[in-house]
Amino acid sequence: MEGAITVRLAVYPGSFDPVTNGHIDILEKSSKIFDEIIVAVIHNVTKKALFSLDERVKLIEESTRHLSNVRVDAFSGLLANYLEDKQACAIIRGLRTVTDFEYEMHMAMMNKKLIPNIDTMFFMSDSQYTFISSSAVKEAALLGGDVGSLVPPVVKTGLEEKMMNDG
Ligand code: PNS
C-alpha cells in the first residue's frame, strides 16, 4: 500500500547470563540490517541463573546504549508466541563454531514449524569472539580470572560484585 512503512523488527532471544562481547558483536552486525531489534531475555524458572532477570536486562541495556535501534525485553514461554505478539520478521542467533550448529539447527527448525512465516538469521561471530561463552566467562570470573576483555565493563563490575557477595 502506498505510504505504508514496514518496520523490519527482529528478535534476538537468549539467556544472556551474562551478556558478553560476543553477543554485542552479533548485535552490532544485525542492527545494521534490521530497523529495530529486541533483545529478548528468557525468564526460565527451571534454569538457575547467576544474574536475575532484571539484572540481565539492565546489563544488556547499559551495554547497548551505542545502538539506538536496540531495545531489551524479557519473555517467558514459547518464543514463537512472543515473535507473533511483537510482529517480528526474523529471529537472530549467533554462530561461533561448528559445535553451535546442531543445537541451533534444531532450534531454528522447531521455531520454523511453530511459526512458519519467520526464519532464523544467523550471524557469524568475529574470530576474536568464537571462544567466548557466558558459562566460561562466569566460571573464569568466579575463580578469580580476569574477564575484562571478554565482557562489557558493566558486566565485569557485576561479576566482581557477585564474587564479593559470595564470599
Ligand atoms: O542463550 P540460549 O540459552 O542458547 O537461548 C535459548 C533460547 C532462550 C533462545 C531458547 O531456549 C528458547 O527460545 N526458549 C523458549 C522456549 C521455546 O520457544 N522453545 C521452542 C523452540 S526450541
Image: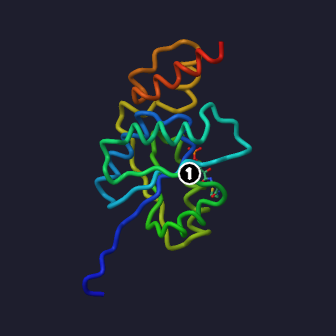
Q: Extreme left residue here?
A: 3
Residue 114 relative to residue 157: left or right: right
The image shows residue 58 at horizontal and vertical percentages of 49, 39
The image shows residue 53 at horizontal and vertical percentages of 60, 42
- Considering the image in quadrants, where does the N terminus appear? bottom left
Q: Residue at x 43, y 53 (%)?
A: 122
The image shows residue 46 at horizontal and vertical percentages of 74, 44
**Above/below status of 126 relative to 154:** below
Report the number of numbered marks: 1
The image shows residue 11 at horizontal and vertical percentages of 47, 57
- Considering the image in quadrants, where does the C terminus appear? top right
Q: How is the image coloured?
A: rainbow
Instruction: State the residue in front, 61 or 15.
Output: 61
Q: Which residue is mark 1?
A: 74
Residue 49 relative to residue 116: left or right: right
Is the residue marked 1 within 8 Å of ligand 1, measured from its CB? no
Q: Residue at x 46, y 30 (%)?
A: 131
The three-letter amino acid code for the residue at tag 1 is: Ala
Number of other residues with Cα within 10 Å of mark 1, as a class: few under 14, some 14 to 19, many 20 or more = some
**Above/below status of 158 relative to 108:** above
**Above/below status of 31 relative to 141:** below
Q: Extreme bottom residue here?
A: 1
Q: Secondary structure at mark 1?
A: strand
Quadrant in the picture for residue 107: bottom right
**Above/below status of 33 relative to 161:** below
